Image: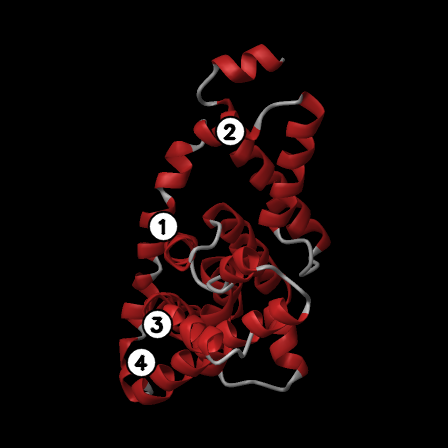
Amino acid sequence: MTNIIIENPFFGLCLSLIAFLIGIQINKKLKHPALNPLLIGIIIIICFLKITHIDYSIYYEQNKILNFLLGPATVVLAVPLYKNIEILKENLKAVSIGVLLGTITSIISVVYMASFLGANDKILLSMTPKAVTAPIAMEVSRVLGGIPSLTAGLVAITGIFGACFAPEILRLFKIKNKIAIGIAIGTTTHALGTTRAFQEGEVQGAMSSLSIGLAGLITALVAPYIIFIMQNYQMI
């Protein structure tokens, strides 16, 4: 079995797709927010790699096509945004301020929490951009002096948590405005959370899609300055 996996360049890709399809079927059948298809797929893949003793680097290499498609898939999220462009124009100021404050709050809160829990500088800097989409988060982490691979894992965890529980948390706090829901989900849980936002409604999904790009841009611009200020004034 191990030799077949190593020799077949498409085995890892097939494993990813099958695991995700299984996750979709389980999610449809049990209909529980915690049973996110991506989360189930990740668990299946981890168990499979552990049982077969396949090195992760081999699996990663066999998924290069899928990894490449992440970029175009994110761009496609702009389609529902275009369909709801009038809503965006009417609420541009509120959306801009919401994403800006949400992004800054996300950065400061995670840095303070990591510092309070005793995380070293490498881990703290790796956690800083965990709320934005992976390509941007990993580059910001590298610039700050963090560990990009660790950042990628944290981004995935953040997104999965948002996809599972973000709408429920917002309902708990009685937030019902569709635009606010979309902004909150997209700003804090990037593309994975946005998939759940689309399940809530097209407006929520469109606003979440917009927030992904804005939050990534803001994080790339302000995160180094926030860390610099907090370190120089011994706030962390």
Residue in the foreground of this view, choosing between 84 and 226: 226
Camera-nearest label, 4 or 3: 3
Circle 2: is it few (<14), some (14-19), or many (20+) Cα within 10 Å?
few
Q: Amino acid at mark 3?
A: Ile
| Residue at the spot 63% in from the left edge and 61% down from the top edge | 119
Rounded to the nearest angstrom, the CA distance separating label 3 from label 2 is: 32 Å
Which residue has dot 4 on it?
Answer: 88
Give the structural element (helix, strand or loop) at label 3.
helix
Spot occupied by residue 121 in the image (x, y as percentages of width and height): 54, 60
* Quadrant the C terminus occupies: bottom right
Vertical arrangement, residue 170 with respect to residue 111, above or below: below
- Which of the two labelled residues, at mark 3 and mark 1, occupies the earlier sequence position? 1
- Specify whether 74 is left or right of 170: left
Position of 136 with respect to 12 (left or right) is: left
Q: CA distance from mark 4 to mark 1?
A: 22 Å
Q: Mark on residue 218?
A: 3
Asked if one can make out residue 45 in the rendered structure from this viewpoint, the answer is yes
Residue at position x 48%, y 77% in the image: 230
Against 190, residue 55 (above or below) is: above
Front one among 107 and 202: 107
Q: What residue would you read off at disc 2?
A: 57
Q: Which mark is residue 87?
A: none
- Sequence-first disc among 4 and 1: 1
**Rendered position, 213 above or below 52:** below
User: Mark 3 touching mark 2, by CB under 8 A?
Assistant: no
Residue on which the image places disc 1:
73
Label whose residue precedes the other's in the sequence (4 or 3): 4
